[in-house]
Image (cartoon, rainbow, N blue to C red):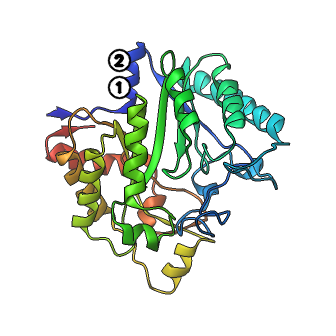
């Protein structure tokens, strides 16, 4: 049996103990395909509340971008970072005994702000006790060289990751879901991040509109070829109050089944280079905002049992 290299095992091997990510949702951040810079409305599937548990209570009427010259909410943003880290540390330490953490800037595009703001927020997180590094969720069209330079400098003493939403390597799909950037833009961003010596995690979504299994596998292969160090696999699910929900309600979109998702996931792992770290193999939501597919509302344990069983049949341990 071949053991899949997980992010948890990678961190434990490196630091000699379990390390947990703390998800952060900081007010004032948005995305360039929401604010009109490259598109409006955001990704068709995206309701950020469903992806980030801390988001709903941290909304602001002020939204930053790369050209913002002032940030009147910086102190509030820093307070949110400190508060969220403190709360999650307390929970993870009491329930799991975790003593080391990575601050995960998760909701929206977390490099889409002036460099001075980003530096303040990243430094604030790293200055909290027991925070050993950062993981920063972003888009390929929203990160400046000076941010990469600073993260590269931090990486000499801290665990630093950049997480890019690749989603698909088909331009027609990216256009359909309103990403606002091209596949070539993703490739260039990952290449540049790697040139700065940074760890890169790529996100892939399976079940995107009009995509076949072969297309999903091609996206996986091309993403691996980009040189990513780690990968997150996600099934596409439909939540209320999104453009995708409208398409689903009109009968224009059919969600991926659990069997089909697990099959393409296993196929992807079979073609994945052994050195790539797997950070996630599924996703879901367990509240009333989920429209479909129903299996994405099942418990994490239920999903993982099915996935592990399928992987075992192919000779893998996860």
**Residue 230: image location, x then y, percent:** 35, 38
Kindly state the secondary structure of the residue where label 2 is placed.
helix
Q: Do we see residue 282 in this rendering?
A: no
Give the quarter of the figure containing the C terminus.
top left
Q: Label 2, on which residue?
A: 13
Question: Tag on residue 9?
Answer: 1
The one nearer the camera, 99 or 170, is 170
Q: Is residue 237 above or below residue 14?
A: below
Q: How many marks?
A: 2
Give the spatial CA distance, label 2 vs label 1.
Answer: 6 Å
Side of 316 relative to 130 (left or right): left
Label 1 neighbourhood size at 10 Å, few (<14), some (14-19), many (20+)? some
Figure quadrant of the N terminus: top left
**Residue at left offset 72%, top offset 36%:** 117
In front of the other: 309 or 38: 38
The residue sitting at 33% across, 67% down in the picture is: 257
Q: Is residue 58 left or right of residue 218?
A: right
- In the rendered structure, the answer to whether residue 232 lies left or right of residue 317 reads right
The disc label shown at residue 195, or none = none
Q: Could you tell me residue 148's position as x and y percent?
A: 52, 34
Query: Percent x, y for residue 243?
Result: 57, 74
Q: In the rendered view, would you say 137 is above or below 177? A: above
Q: Residue at x 67, y 19 (%)?
A: 127
Q: Is residue 169 visible?
A: yes
Q: Residue 245: x and y, percent?
A: 54, 75
The answer to whether 158 is drawn above or below residue 121 in the figure is above
């Amino acid at each position: 049996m071949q053991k899949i290299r997980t992010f948890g095992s990678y961190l434990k091997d490196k630091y000699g103990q379990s390390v947990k990510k703390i998800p952060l949702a900081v007010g004032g951040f948005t995305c360039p395909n929401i604010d009109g810079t490259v598109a409006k409305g955001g990704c068709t599937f995206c309701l950020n509340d469903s992806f980030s548990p801390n988001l709903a209570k941290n909304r602001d009427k002020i939204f930053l971008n790369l050209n913002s010259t002032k940030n009147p909410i910086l102190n509030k943003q820093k307070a949110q970072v400190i508060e969220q880290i403190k709360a999650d540390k307390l929970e993870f330490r009491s329930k799991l005994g975790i003593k080391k953490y990575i601050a995960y800037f998760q909701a929206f595009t977390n490099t889409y702000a002036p460099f001075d703001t980003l530096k303040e927020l990243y430094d604030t997180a790293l200055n909290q006790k027991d925070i050993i590094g950062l993981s920063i969720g972003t888009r390929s069209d929203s990160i400046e060289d000076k941010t990469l330079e600073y993260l590269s400098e931090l990486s000499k003493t801290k665990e630093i990751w950049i997480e890019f939403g690749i989603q698909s390597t088909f331009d027609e799909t990216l256009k359909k879901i309103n990403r606002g950037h091209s596949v070539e833009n993703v490739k260039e961003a990952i290449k540049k991040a790697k040139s700065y010596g940074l760890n890169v995690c790529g996100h892939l979504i399976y079940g995107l509109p009009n995509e076949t299994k072969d297309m999903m596998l091609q996206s996986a292969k091309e993403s691996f070829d980009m040189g990513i160090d780690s990968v997150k696999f996600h099934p596409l699910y439909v939540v209320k109050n999104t453009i995708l929900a409208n398409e689903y309600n009109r009968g224009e979109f059919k969600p991926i089944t659990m069997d089909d998702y697990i099959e393409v996931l296993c196929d992807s792992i079979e073609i994945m280079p052994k050195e790539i770290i797997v950070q996630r193999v599924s996703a879901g939501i367990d509240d009333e905002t989920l429209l479909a597919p129903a299996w994405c509302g099942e418990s994490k344990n239920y999903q993982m049992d099915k996935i592990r069983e399928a992987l075992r049949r192919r000779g893998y341990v996860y």
